[in-house]
Amino acid sequence: MVFSIPKDSQSVSELKEFYRQMVLIRKFEEAAAKAYSVGKIGGFLHLYIGQEAVGVGSIAALTPKDYIVSTYRDHGHALARGLNPKPLMAELFGKGTGISKGNGGSMHFFDRNAHFMGGHGIVGGHISLAAGIAFASKYKKEDSVTICFFGEGAANIGSFHEGLNLAAIWKLPVVFICENNHYAMGTPEYRALAVKDVSVRAYAYDMARDHIEGDEVRKVKDHVQVAVERARRGEGPTLIEVSTYRFRGHSMSDPAKYRTKEELEAYKKKDPLMRARHELELGGIKTEELDKMDLEIQSQIDEAYQYAETSPEPPLSQLHKYVYAEDK
Amino acid sequence: MAILTYREALNRAMVEEMEKDLSIYLMGEEVGHYQGAYKVSQGMLDKFGEERVIDTPISENGFAGIGVGSAMVGLRPIIEFMTWNFSLVAIDQIINSAAKMNYMSGGQFPMPIVFRGAGGAGGRLGAQHSQAFESWYAHCPGLKVVCPATPKDAYGLLKSSIRDNNPTIFIESEVLYGSKGEVPEQEFTIPLGLGEIKRKGTDITLVTWSRALGFAEEAAGILEKEGISVEIVDLRSLRPLDENLIYESVKKTNRAVVVEEGWPVAGFGAQIAYLIQKNAFSYLDHPVERVTQMDVPMSYAANLERLSLPNATRVADTIREMLQ
Ligand SMILES: Cc1ncc(C[n+]2csc(CCOP(=O)(O)OP(=O)(O)O)c2C)c(N)n1
């Protein structure tokens, strides 16, 4: 493995910040998995563990006015956006203090203020929503850019093709980021995609494309940055494929028997967190400092867990609320 | 009699039918190598091979259309939707192609296709993954809609659906997959359109189907202790509908309540209430009542999900009020 050692203090502190965010996501999800296994979290729980560098690197290329659209695997994207882990954890616990007031759960984090435009549960359906958000930015002559995350499985659904084509013909300011973790549930990519390289599909829409490895967080940021700037200049969308891997099953209920232990172990050697940590050490950061950082993040997560656990359930009067918007 | 789970009964029905008829194939996401997202197709890939147990990418509209096209030229597809929530991506093919094909071709193209998969509200899966779809599909002429509540019914009705020359919407209950029941070892079928009295009673007729049968039976048990005798009509299929079974029961009890998992507005229970007042009006001592899911999307929060879903307490309360 070739390591890209951060040379100056600016790149060290950037990588440190990325590392902090990735550890936050990892620990958040480890806590969530624990809560799920003792029944404190219900429904589906799709973990992002292994893919952290994609969300963190991509979202680092955005400004607060930009938009993010996510899937049911949304915890990492939300945390990378800087959302407070407390209301996120509370959402997983189905509490009234949750980011979607307990109505959404793991798959449906939303934060209007943070331009976090939701976790969405129907595969690929959100890709045209992202195009729509970008359409509105263009319509309103705002220079916001939207990035939309999805898996390679979603690239087979109609909404992907229609969304990309519309985005391309109208030069919408959107970056489509395919997090290719090589499996859609139990289906490996070779059984689902006629052309395995999803980014190649950009040619069909005369769209810019890129394809990168997702274990190196700063590289993800640099590449996404190029696409974001292109979108902001009004030069239209980009399709970026980021190759990555999920260390856990598709969701907590999936034992992931369809892949080998060797494959998993090989990918674990490319763990983006380990990589970032190692590069920080090569860049002169002391192990003790990183350990201390890990501990601080752990206590932040413990606090979030505590907060979620002790928060009240939503009031029963909430049942009929929010079905329709309130009059202004 | 064998004791089978609901999922095993479905599996047995498909296996037996596929063994007999080469034109039947099973297609859907994760039906093969993964053995089914809900394990309904467990073992079928090994038995029938990749030509007949076919894994698809996430392309519901595409593979629903492939099913319809192949049925036009003589195949008998079973198309599995991982859950019915995802069938919405394919609803154009189901309604505009499958349901209307025989009609618009003047009877040239019968459509022997079964669309099946998990339906209803699961354990805290939230708004996009918890919904009962039978009312949506029962709305469309050309489709048959089947909603079994027991392993025995699941087995007998799935076999009939597979043999039927019409597009069948076969909605399995996600929460019933693990439930157990007796299924005769001898092969049998249950005709579509034949309901069943699941419990005999004299004071009130409770009309229901699928998972809501459980709420109904629980409520009937509670009420029995209070001296109230509930007759439960399990429709089993909504299209065709066993109307006479409902009327016969209402003539005896003079009261009816419909219990269903879906939303109230324009739900199938409204149709049943209409039919009862139209065809058994003079026998009624009380307006037909309904117990449904609350008129809201499903919340993730445990307490709100509980409040939202129909349950035995709500059924029992409704019946007590009707009998006052
Ligand atoms: C339209 C639709 N079909 C099926 C599903 C069930 N489902 C949820 S996630 C998933 C796999 C998606 O894989 P991919 O897009 O590669 O994303 P990943 O989970 O790998 O992040 C499937 C089949 C769904 N939610 N929506």
Image (tube, rainbow, N blue to C red):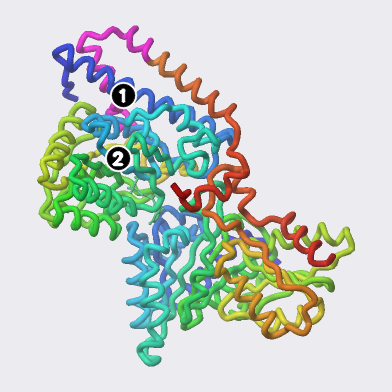
Report the magenta residues as a range. Answer: A265-293
Type of amino acid at the residue the image marks with label 1: Leu
Picture layout, residue B222 above or below residue B51: above
Residue at 43% over, 30% down: A29
Residue A224: x, y in percent? Answer: 18, 36
Determine which quarter of the picture holds residue B75: bottom left
Residue B130 visible in the displayed image? yes
Do the residues marked 2 and 1 share a common chain? yes
Mark 1 CB lies closer than 8 A to ligand 1 = no
Residue picked out by circle 1: A273
Q: Tell me the mark number nearer the camera, choosing from 2 and 1.
A: 2
Residue at 46% over, 59% down: B85
Figure quadrant of the N terminus of chain A = top left
Residue placed most toward the observer, B292 or B121: B292
Q: Earlier in the sequence, mark 2 or mark 1?
A: 2
Is-magenta flag for residue B284? no
Residue A294: x, y in percent? Answer: 39, 16
Residue A215 visible in the displayed image? no
**Answer yes or no: do the residues labelled 2 and 1 have beta carbons within 8 Å?**
no
Residue picked out by circle 2: A68
Numbered tag placed on residue B293 in the rendering: none
Residue at 10% over, 45% down: A235
Picture layout, residue A313 above or below residue B260: above
Tell me the chain of label 1.
A
| Magenta portion: prevailing SS class | helix
Picture layout, residue B77 above or below residue A239: below
Residue A68 as seen in the image, left or right of residue B133? left
* Pointer 1 local density, CA inside 10 Å: few below 14, some 14–19, many at least 20: many
Residue B162 as seen in the image, left or right of residue B155? left
Type of amino acid at the residue the image marks with label 2: Ile
Determine which quarter of the picture holds residue A273: top left
